[in-house]
Image (cartoon, grey):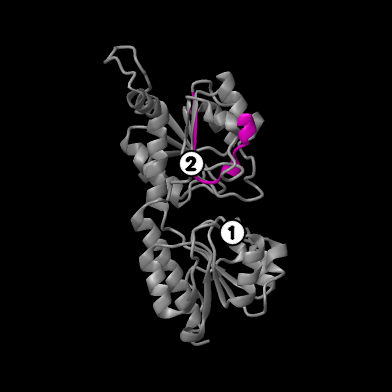
Amino acid sequence: MPSERLKVVVTRRLPEAVETRMKELFNVTLRENDQQMSREELVAAMKDADVLVPTLTDTLDSSVLSSAGDRLKLIANYGAGIDHIDVHTARQRGILVSNTPGVVTEDTADMTIALILAVTRRIPEGLATMQSGDWAGWAPTALLGGRVGGRRLGILGMGRIGQAVARRAKAFGMQVHYHNRRRLRPEIEDELEATYWESLDQMVARMDIISINCPHTPATFHLMNARRLKLMKPNAVIVNTSRGEVIDENALTRMLRAGEISGAGLDVFEHGHQINPRLRQLNNVVLLPHMGSATIEGRLEMGEKVLLNVKTFADGHRPPDLVVPAML
């Protein structure tokens, strides 16, 4: 399939440099505005394209994929997470799926540490005080937070991002603990000075900070449910920069309101941008608009990976970041 004839449809606005390169390489249809496509627009795009370049805001479930035309052969996702794509149905229909792994690791780990500091040191409360003009000057008991050095950090999910968080936490003097589907190799544990917990319940009950760094899968949906959240110490905090569905948001909100958990830092939410309004009212919660991977460098690297996947496919080869069902 010659690259000059390959029809590529992009569902959202991408960095200008990425869009420019796409126009040079392919017959590309770019999004004129940055509104996410409706279901009907997605179906129309898939009938018209050889390659679809979606993002995490595009739900490509079995019913949408069943409406795809015979022309669609590759879904080159702009992003690492693919829980919005029914990969099994895509493969059954002969559609390959690729993603952009490894690009957001360092940026997301940075944001995880930023949220830990923001919650434990009460940074948003201090910012609000300054912006309101109500600050009357320094006081020895004002806005007292907690020191992160020496605290036990429990990382749920020890993949690329979890390990990057562990390296940063170690530099801050935190004690690193983790729970993962598979235990890390001894040399990696030694390097990170990380303690493995086979039982998630036992780890959660003993940590000062919980960091969620696992993907959303059927097995991880509400992994931090009401029962498990109640195991946390009252002075513990929880931070999530992975997927909102891993935490039961309603149960978390109730416990934060009741003071049963000290605080939370959330960059992702169970129902996308439809956030539980009671969370917004709490001063012990830091909410961010899914900024974990939002760096210029990261967005450009994601685009470069998409371009490489599509160009490799156009040249008749297997995309380097092909997603296969065994990975899910």
Q: Residue furthest left?
A: 137
Seen from the viewer's position, the closer of residues 188 and 266 is: 266
* Residue corresponding to mark 2: 267
Relative height, residue 220 to residue 238 (above, below): below
Q: Residue at x 62, y 58 (%)?
A: 59
Q: Residue at x 60, y 71 (%)?
A: 45
Query: Which quadrant is the C terminus positioned in?
Result: bottom right
Element marked by disc 2: loop
Relative height, residue 190 to residue 99 (above, below): above
Q: Residue furthest bottom?
A: 2
**First to last magenta residue range:** 236-252
Splitting the image into 4 quarters, where does residue 94 fall?
bottom right
Element marked by disc 1: loop
Disc 2 marks a residue whose amino acid type is Asp
Counting from the top left corner in percent of width and height, residue 132 is at 36, 24
Counting from the top left corner in percent of width and height, residue 47 is at 64, 75
Seen from the viewer's position, the closer of residues 196 and 125 is: 125
Disc 1 marks a residue whose amino acid type is Asp
Relative height, residue 128 to residue 290 (above, below): above
Counting from the top left corner in percent of width and height, residue 79 is at 49, 59
Counting from the top left corner in percent of width and height, residue 153 is at 44, 33
> Badge 2, how many Cα within 10 Å: few under 14, some, many 20+?
many
Label 1 – label 2 distance at C-alpha: 19 Å
Splitting the image into 4 quarters, where does residue 114 fall?
top left
Residue 58 numbered tag? 1
Q: Residue at x 50, y 62 (%)?
A: 12
